[in-house]
Image: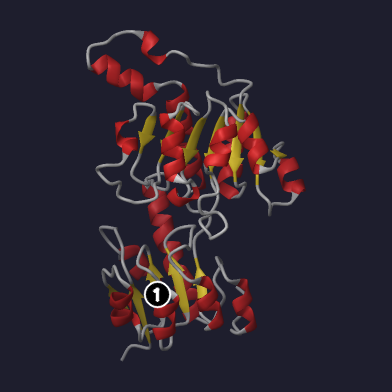
């Protein structure tokens, strides 16, 4: 008879073998992968689970209140916007994520989108393939060295991006109301208020997590003060940028273009105006991905669950306040 039931609420991976390999090290685990899309489906599949592994399915307050004996919820990824953290903490459920599995991948992808926008790579490729061999299709293009990159959020991923951008001679500024100034100083990054960052930046890269206070934080007010030559990059979460305001800014020529790996609605709707804009590069939420990062993500997500079921706090503990309700050992 199984001692613990672990439910994977939903997943997009071809195999869950790495997760199962990790969880097999815990005595008596029943591993149950399902594909839930709604609250009701999660409740039906996981009401009696001891642990959840989650990707996109909603782990709302309604779901959490229906969990009878859940000890831990671990999410594939850095963001935990699918989980009601407050409700989980109130119920004494530990929430884990994986904060360090794709720092190089996302920072590389953000810089790749930046470079593609600035150097007009996609526009020029399309022109050549349609029979137009003319460099003037890409005019104007400005030199990278000496330009300013503004980072909205200065966590681990944008810190990694800052170092890479500085190697190209780009000055880096950032908006992060939580980060200690000495951390920014150690990276040679100047901290600014959001609107001031938007005014001085030639490129803006969004890295803020999606929480209530960051939803739509880059909107009309910010686009109105950006340079007309500025490009905005988003590899964080789509709703951090007010997409309607972004579309209006692009249509009005208030900014030069955008490189977006994430959108407000994913997959993108076929009638979204961004699909028709030559100065917008769209990717399908892939910045996190490499073969190595995916394997690391899967193992670490499962390890969060294994740690809690073994009597330890996980390495990647999101809701630190839960320690007031749950007495486990530190690893």
Residue placed most toward the observer, 179 or 107: 179
For the point 42% across and 73% down, the residue is: 60
For the point 53% across and 28% down, the residue is: 230
Side (left or right) of 205 relative to 278: right
The colour scheme applied to this rendered structure is secondary structure
Side (left or right) of 255 relative to 331: left
Q: What element carries label 1?
A: strand
Side (left or right) of 270 relative to 39: left
Residue placed most toward the observer, 195 or 27: 195
For the point 33% across and 88% down, the residue is: 2
x and y percentages locating residue 70 in the rendered image: 44, 83
**In the figure, residue 49 lies in which quadrant?**
bottom left
Residue placed most toward the observer, 56 or 34: 56
x and y percentages locating residue 113 in the rendered image: 44, 33
Res. 112 in view:
no
Is residue 94 placed above or below 318 in the rendered structure? below
x and y percentages locating residue 274 in the rendered image: 34, 36
x and y percentages locating residue 145 in the rendered image: 60, 20
Side (left or right) of 85 relative to 200: left
Is residue 294 placed above or below 283 in the rendered structure? below
Res. 77 in view:
yes
| Quarter of the picture holding the N terminus | bottom left
Q: Residue furthest left?
A: 130
According to the image, label 1 marks what residue?
52
Count the labels in the image: 1
Is residue 98 placed above or below 268 in the rendered structure? below
For the point 55% across and 31% down, the residue is: 203
| Quarter of the picture holding the C terminus | bottom right
The crowding category of the residue bearing disc 1, from other C-alpha atoms within 10 Å (few below 14, some 14 to 19, many at least 20), is many
Residue placed most toward the observer, 183 or 82: 82
């Amino acid at each position: 008879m199984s001692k613990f039931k672990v439910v994977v609420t939903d997943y997009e991976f071809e195999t869950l073998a790495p997760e199962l390999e990790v969880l097999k090290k815990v005595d008596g685990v029943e591993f149950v992968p399902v594909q839930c899309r709604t609250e009701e489906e999660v409740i039906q599949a996981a009401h009696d689970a001891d642990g959840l592994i989650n990707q996109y399915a909603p782990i709302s307050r309604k779901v959490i209140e229906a969990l009878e004996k859940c000890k831990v919820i671990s999410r594939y990824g850095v963001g935990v916007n699918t989980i009601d953290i407050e409700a989980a903490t109130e119920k004494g459920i530990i929430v884990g994520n994986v904060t360090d599995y794709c720092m190089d991948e996302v920072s590389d992808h953000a810089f790749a989108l930046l470079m593609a926008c600035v150097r007009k790579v996609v526009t020029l490729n399309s022109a050549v393939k349609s029979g137009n061999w003319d460099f003037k299709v890409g005019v104007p293009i400005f030199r990278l060295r000496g330009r300013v990159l503004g980072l909205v959020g200065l966590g681990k991923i944008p810190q990694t991006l800052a170092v890479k951008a500085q190697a190209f001679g780009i000055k880096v500024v950032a908006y992060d109301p939580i980060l200690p100034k000495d951390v920014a100083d150690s990276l040679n990054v100047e901290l600014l208020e959001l609107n001031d960052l938007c005014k001085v930046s030639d490129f803006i890269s969004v890295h803020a997590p999606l929480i209530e206070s960051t939803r739509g934080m880059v909107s009309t007010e910010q686009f109105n003060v950006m340079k007309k030559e500025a490009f905005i990059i988003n590899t964080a979460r789509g709703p951090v940028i007010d997409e309607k305001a972004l579309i209006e800014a692009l249509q009005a020529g208030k900014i030069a273009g955008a490189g977006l790996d994430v959108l407000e609605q994913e997959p993108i709707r076929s009638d979204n105006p961004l699909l028709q804009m030559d100065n917008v590069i769209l990717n399908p939420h892939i910045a996190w991905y490499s073969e190595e990062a995916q394997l690391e993500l899967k193992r670490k997500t499962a390890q969060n669950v294994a740690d809690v079921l073994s009597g330890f706090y996980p390495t990647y503990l999101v809701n630190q306040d839960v320690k007031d309700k749950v007495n486990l050992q530190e690893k």
